[in-house]
Image (spheres, coloured by chain):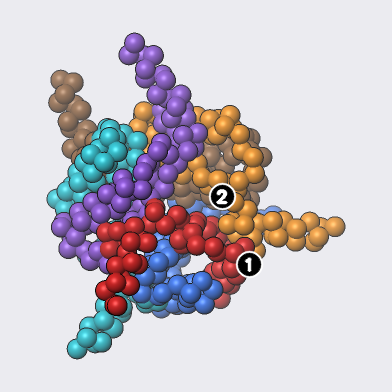
Chain colours: A purple, B red, C blue, D orange, E cyan, F brown
Amino acid sequence: MPYVNIKVTREGVTPEQKATLIHGVTDLLQRVLGKNPNTTFVVIDEVDLQDWGIGGLPVEQYRQGLTSQTS
Amino acid sequence: MPYVNIKVTREGVTPEQKATLIHGVTDLLQRVLGKNPNTTFVVIDEVDLQDWGIGGLPVEQYRQGLTSQTS
Amino acid sequence: MPYVNIKVTREGVTPEQKATLIHGVTDLLQRVLGKNPNTTFVVIDEVDLQDWGIGGLPVEQYRQGLTSQTS
Amino acid sequence: MPYVNIKVTREGVTPEQKATLIHGVTDLLQRVLGKNPNTTFVVIDEVDLQDWGIGGLPVEQYRQGLTSQTS
Amino acid sequence: MPYVNIKVTREGVTPEQKATLIHGVTDLLQRVLGKNPNTTFVVIDEVDLQDWGIGGLPVEQYRQGLTSQTS
Amino acid sequence: MPYVNIKVTREGVTPEQKATLIHGVTDLLQRVLGKNPNTTFVVIDEVDLQDWGIGGLPVEQYRQGLTSQTS
């Protein structure tokens, strides 16, 4: 009876993509550990860009920094 | 000082029902473990149906499958 | 299909107390929201005292401070 | 590669305050544990007042109780 | 920069199986959402059987109930 | 009443370092958002190296790959 939580930035993930993630993770747990899909929960959280930090910065500023470094 | 997180699908849970959940869980922890309600946190997350998977499917499709199986 | 996570300090919670918490939370969700117990997960985490902070201190030091304040 | 999740009540936290939290936590982990900021994630969740319980009550009712006790 | 948390019961999951889960989830997020593996975190939690509840019971008692029902 | 969860790899974090993290995060939330330390919880999770994945690999293998790439 696994529980899986997937957190991604909120950037237009479609319901179809979410369904593919749910199916893929559930299938993986069944293949690798023999877990029953009927007691496998997958919960997806989309996180606003201003709420996700990396490198000490909100993600949008972090990406701008990467871009300006490489240019 | 317990911390409790309750995740349910977003399907019209009312503020009164949330208050009942908060009270019930806090009371349970006080009765069973003697925990002080003033340092018991309860956080409720409502999760959109397309973000909750079970049986390898988003929950709405999963329920439709159950219905068609039994009919 | 609720998912509930209960975090408490690791201070000798017995398997019987855990079973009572699991039953109590599941029953609460069934009574208040009509949730099916067979798709209600409850996960309990016991957290070492040195890993839980309140008032800016690990919990043991915090409690010692409360005791000395009131005495 | 730390992962930090900060949950606060939704009460008008600004993007600037969030950026300060992200920077502060990342800096703390670098100073105390030598963690690389580029693999330090910080995720902030704002929680509606009706979804956060303390003292067995939703937070707004809890605060009203504190106010009336002290007056 | 996704963050994925996988919780399973503690029942002898091997390091190789964990590595397969980590690779599989990371690969899935790259294929479905184009996420960079170098900023994809996967954290696996193994949960003791007495700490996982389903159907209002700790998981071992729940399984015993299923077995006796079907026999 | 913030709740903060810090996850780091289990690599010899001392109780003193944990206390510094707890104090630092609590102080940050008080300075930036005016949060009361007495209702600020910090929970630290140490995660075994085989349970943390990045780049599609358990963290130890990931680090070995970085080392061999740069040499």
Q: Chain of mark 1?
A: B
Label 2 element class? strand
Compared across the picture, whether E21 is left or right of F45 comes to: left
Report whether mark 2 lies on the same chain as mark 1. no
The Cα–Cα distance between marks 2 and 1, rounded to whole angstroms, is: 17 Å
Q: Which mark is residue B16?
A: 1
- Above or below residue D57? Residue A44 is above
User: Disc 2 residue type?
Assistant: Val
Q: Which mark is residue C67?
A: none
Q: Which residue is found at the position 39% from the left and 34% from the top?
A: D40
Compared across the picture, whether C44 is left or right of F22 comes to: left
Q: Residue C33: x, y in percent?
A: 51, 71
* Quadrant hosting residue C67: bottom right
Q: Which mark is residue D47?
A: 2
C62 and A31: which is toward the camera: A31
**Residue E8 seen anywhere in this rendered image of the structure:** no
Q: Where's the N terminus of chain E, which quadrant?
A: top left
Q: Around disc 2, counting alpha carbons within 10 Å, would you say few (fewer than 14), some (14 to 19), or many (20 or more)?
A: some
Q: Which residue is found at the position 29% from the left and 38% from the top?
A: E33
**Is the residue under label 1 in contact with that under label 2 (CB below 8 Å)?**
no
**Residue A32 seen anywhere in this rendered image of the structure:** yes
Q: Residue C57: x, y in percent?
A: 55, 47
User: Disc 1 residue type?
Assistant: Glu
Q: Which residue is found at the position 26% from the left and 41% from the top?
A: E32
Q: Residue E14: x, y in percent?
A: 16, 55
Compared across the picture, whether E46 is left or right of B10 comes to: left
Q: Chain of mark 2?
A: D
Label 1 element class? helix
- Above or below residue A66? Residue C17 is below
A60 and D56: which is toward the camera: A60
Q: Residue B50: x, y in percent?
A: 39, 54
